[in-house]
Image (tube, grey):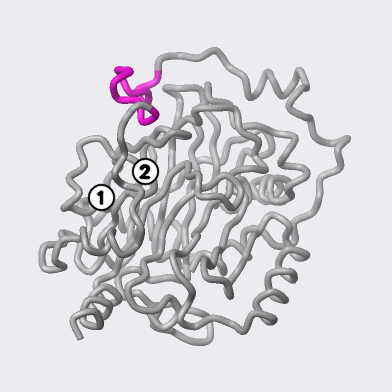
């Protein structure tokens, strides 16, 4: 589902000449990206809360994650259920309940700590309907179907060429291209936009983009100065951009792995990544393309959720990982097992 949005955000990328950018060793960039650390409310208060020191039971395979889901009749945001996975922990979260929709929640992994916000255009929500409407009305020209915002701090210095956002699926697509065509498509997209990784034909399909290019807007701030992630229009504020128009330059530069490798995510700063999708309607679980509308279960197959995650390269090491289930694909899978 992220493919069409990523292509719009990341195609026509061009490499920014090295003479026009400043590498991670430059004094100017250090002045922009390296700021004194202040105590942030994103930091968990005690060492006992460190993910690195806890036994995590969320790194489950797909079958086990499916079995652990509550009956769909108990889903607060039915037909959608969102759960943390792969080492992402949400303090105070009850695993029998979906993560909130419409209001921010805290999360932490071994690589990142912060908060997240999901909004769905046509789905149930904890949010005041007027506030949700204000967001989608503000972006009406994009016809967004959902919003996903991540805000927080990296735990280690990380090159911007190493953080990829999107989806790595658990099993082969039901509607998958033949292997040769899949390889051709992957190579084609790599040539068009080197900051995209696409694989439709393998046993673990993926659609990933460098997070600096795949984000609709991005903001870098000192702790305590980060924007409120619930506002309708999030700011664009990086060392390469300051508004929607200049965000295109940021996407072009950070969508090129070579250029992105000159920059790092600084653990002393707070990053806000705003992604949105105008193609996948999660409430109806349909792909709404310009020329047709398609049932998304026909693409993924029964019993396979989509996910929202950021990973190191194409590995399974996640900065964050959330599975997004829809009751139709889950019900079909359970009926099939019963037979």
**What residue span does the magenta drawing correspond to?**
40-52
- Assess disc 1: are there few (<14), some (14-19) or many (≥20) residues with their C-alpha within 10 Å of its C-alpha: many
| Left or right of 263 in this view: 306 | left
Q: Is residue 294 above or below residue 87?
A: below
| Element at label 1 | loop
Estimate the x, y position of residue 162 in percent, counting from the top left.
Answer: 63, 42
Q: Quadrant of the C terminus?
A: bottom left
Q: Nearer the viewer, residue 151 or 158?
A: 158
Q: Nearer the viewer, residue 206 or 192?
A: 206
Q: Which mark is residue 41?
A: none
> Which secondary structure is most common in the magenta stretch?
loop
Do tag 2 and tag 1 residues touch (Cβ < 8 Å)? yes
Q: Give the spatial CA distance, label 2 vs label 1.
A: 10 Å
Estimate the x, y position of residue 215 in percent, counting from the top left.
Answer: 55, 50
Residue 57 highlighted magenta (yes or no) = no
- Assess disc 2: are there few (<14), some (14-19) or many (≥20) residues with their C-alpha within 10 Å of its C-alpha: many
Q: Quadrant of residue 218?
A: top right
Estimate the x, y position of residue 243 in percent, counting from the top left.
Answer: 60, 43
Q: Residue at 33% across / 53% down in the picture?
A: 60
Extreme residue toward the left, this view: 74
| Left or right of 282 in this view: 276 | right
Q: Residue at 78% across / 44% down in the picture?
A: 258
Residue 46 highlighted magenta (yes or no) = yes
Q: Residue at 29% across / 44% down in the picture?
A: 57
Q: Is residue 299 above or below residue 32?
A: below
Q: Quadrant of residue 35?
A: top right
Q: Which mark is residue 116?
A: 2
Q: Nearer the viewer, residue 146 or 105?
A: 105
Estimate the x, y position of residue 188 in percent, counting from the top left.
Answer: 74, 71
Residue bearing mark 1:
99
């Amino acid at each position: 589902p992220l493919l069409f949005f990523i292509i719009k955000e990341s195609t026509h990328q061009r490499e920014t000449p090295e003479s026009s950018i400043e590498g991670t060793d430059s004094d100017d960039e250090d002045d922009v990206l390296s700021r004194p650390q202040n105590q942030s409310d994103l930091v968990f208060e005690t060492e006992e809360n460190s993910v690195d020191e806890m036994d995590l039971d969320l790194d489950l395979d797909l079958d086990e994650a499916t079995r652990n889901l509550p009956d769909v009749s108990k889903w607060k945001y039915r037909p959608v259920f969102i759960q943390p996975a792969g080492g992402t922990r949400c303090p105070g979260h009850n695993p029998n309940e979906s993560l909130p929709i419409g209001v921010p929640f805290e999360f932490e992994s071994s690589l990142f700590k912060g908060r997240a916000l999901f909004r769905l255009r046509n789905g149930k929500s904890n949010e005041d309907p007027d506030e949700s409407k204000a967001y989608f009305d503000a972006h009406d020209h994009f016809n967004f179907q959902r919003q996903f915002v991540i805000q927080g701090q990296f735990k280690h210095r990380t090159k911007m060429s190493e953080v990829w956002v999107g989806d790595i699926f658990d099993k082969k697509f039901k509607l998958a291209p033949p292997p040769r065509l899949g390889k051709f498509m992957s190579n084609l997209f790599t040539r068009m936009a080197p900051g995209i990784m696409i694989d439709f034909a393998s046993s673990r399909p993926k659609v990933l983009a460098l997070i600096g290019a795949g984000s609709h807007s991005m903001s870098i701030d000192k702790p305590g100065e980060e924007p409120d992630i619930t506002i309708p229009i999030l700011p664009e504020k990086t060392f390469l951009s300051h508004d929607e128009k200049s965000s295109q330059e940021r996407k072009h530069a950070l969508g090129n792995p070579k250029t992105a490798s000159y920059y790092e995510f600084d653990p002393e700063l707070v990053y806000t990544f705003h992604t949105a999708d105008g193609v996948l309607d999660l409430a109806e679980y349909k792909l709404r393309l310009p020329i047709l509308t398609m049932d998304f279960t026909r693409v993924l197959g029964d019993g396979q959720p989509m996910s929202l995650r950021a990973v190191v390269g194409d590995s399974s090491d996640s900065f964050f990982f959330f599975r997004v289930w829809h009751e139709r694909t889950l019900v079909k899978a359970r009926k099939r097992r019963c037979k």
